[in-house]
Image (cartoon, grey):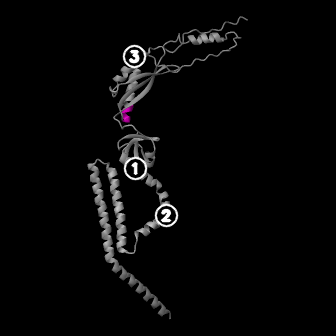
């Protein structure tokens, strides 16, 4: 009895396997046609990608953007080819049913790929609008350096310290970007102070001559020297000059200008003072011997600069306490 049941089970399995084999053999022509259709669509996508590259070269389109468009064409046509091949192999298959099924999870998929899609579209917009290009020196948030690569996901910088920074395109596109090398030249400034006893016109001419003689400073636009502030210990000038925009050049020229200004002021005998502070310690009641009263303190304050020496010492009136005769 058991042998009979086992034989019937084996016979049923064999018949099922034989039926599947016959069905597969019957579907082989459809499978072959479906594979040919899928390959044809893939080849068509490759051809469109080559066309996109050629068109990009003729229209001066960014090569990376042309590659993005070509890759999109390949992906979309490959997907379309798979759907058409599925219909050929399985005539009862309806792509609309697949779309409806995907609609159930579209919200979850959208949230899962939100950042990826945001960076992708931001990268496409950056490549299209070109606010900066590879080779530019830019600053984004706390990062500054030279653009090495712009992809559909991120913008890669090489900092001035030789480090790589990878910034998501979504952050780049939604942030303020300072492009230092967009124009061939840029203005640089620094501050220098002179003493109150020195003549402003003489100091201005001395500084101007030093700046103009520094290597790398442009003649057009020329340098400017303005009085910016009457500070506590000095008259402060702001020096403006123009030079080539790369950061390395700016640092070199600024060093030359600062050195030339210091040497020129020293040669002209013009003081570059440091902050000074005078403190009086006294009893305002003036009841003790040697105390300085309010009137005398104000007199000393008015005259303290009159006797100032060039070396920063004060030769003005000093108060000496009388001897105690008690």
- Secondary structure mostly seen in the magenta stretch: helix
| Disc 2: which residue | 105
Q: Secondary structure at mark 3?
A: helix
| Cβ atoms under marks 3 and 2 closer than 8 Å | no
The extreme top residue here reads 325
140 sits to left or right of 74? right
- Residue situated in front as seen by the camera: 146 or 34: 34
Q: Which mark is residue 267?
A: 3
- Measuring 47% from the left and 55% from the top, which residue is drawn there? 114
Position of 98 with respect to 55 (left or right) is right
Q: CA distance from mark 3 to mark 2?
A: 79 Å
116 to 17, vertically: above or below: above
Q: Residues within 10 Å of mark 3 (few under 14, many from 20)?
A: few
- Regarding residue 153, the answer to whether it shows in the image is no
Q: Which residues are magenta?
A: 246-251
Location of residue 240 with respect to 304 vertically, above or below: below
Residue nearest the viewer, comparing 139 with 90: 90
Q: Which residue is mark 1?
A: 123
Cα–Cα gap, marks 3 and 1: 55 Å
Give coordinates of residue 195: x percent, y percent: 48, 17
Q: Residues within 10 Å of mark 2 (few under 14, many from 20)?
A: few
Front tag of 3 and 2:
2
C-alpha distance separating marks 2 and 1 = 26 Å
Lower position in the chain sequence, tag 2 or tag 1? 2
Using the image as rendered, state which of residue 52 and residue 290 is in the foreground.
52
Task: Where is residue 208? Give x, y as percent.
Answer: 38, 21
């Amino acid at each position: 009895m058991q042998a009979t049941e086992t034989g019937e089970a084996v016979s049923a399995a064999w018949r099922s396997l034989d039926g599947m084999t016959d069905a597969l053999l019957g579907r082989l022509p459809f499978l072959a046609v479906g594979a040919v259709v899928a390959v044809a669509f893939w080849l068509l996508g490759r051809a469109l990608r080559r066309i996109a590259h050629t068109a990009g070269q003729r229209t001066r389109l960014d090569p990376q953007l042309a590659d993005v468009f070509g890759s999109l064409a390949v992906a979309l046509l490959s997907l379309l080819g798979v759907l058409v091949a599925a219909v050929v192999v399985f005539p009862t298959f309806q792509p609309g049913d697949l779309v409806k099924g995907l609609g159930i999870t579209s919200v979850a998929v959208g949230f899962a790929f939100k950042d990826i899609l945001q960076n992708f579209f931001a990268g496409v917009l950056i490549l299209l609008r070109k606010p900066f290009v590879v080779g530019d020196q830019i600053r984004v948030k706390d990062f500054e350096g030279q653009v090495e690569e712009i992809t559909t996901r991120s913008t890669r910088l090489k900092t001035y310290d030789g480090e790589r920074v990878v910034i998501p395109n979504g952050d780049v596109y939604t942030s303020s970007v300072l492009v230092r090398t967009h124009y061939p030249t840029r203005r640089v400034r620094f501050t220098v102070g002179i003493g109150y006893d020195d003549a402003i016109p003489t100091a201005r001419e001395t500084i101007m001559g030093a700046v103009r003689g520094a290597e790398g400073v442009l003649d057009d636009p020329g340098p400017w020297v303005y009085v910016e502030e009457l500070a506590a210990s000095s008259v402060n000038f702001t020096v403006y000059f123009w030079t080539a925009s790369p950061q390395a050049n700016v640092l070199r020229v600024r060093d030359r200008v600062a050195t030339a200004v210091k040497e020129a002021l020293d040669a002209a005998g013009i003081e570059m003072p440091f902050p000074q502070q005078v403190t009086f310690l006294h009893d305002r009641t003036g009841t003790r011997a040697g105390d300085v009263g309010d009137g005398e303190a104000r007199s000393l304050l008015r005259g303290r600069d009159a006797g100032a020496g060039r070396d920063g010492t004060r030769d003005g009136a000093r108060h000496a306490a009388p001897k105690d005769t008690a």
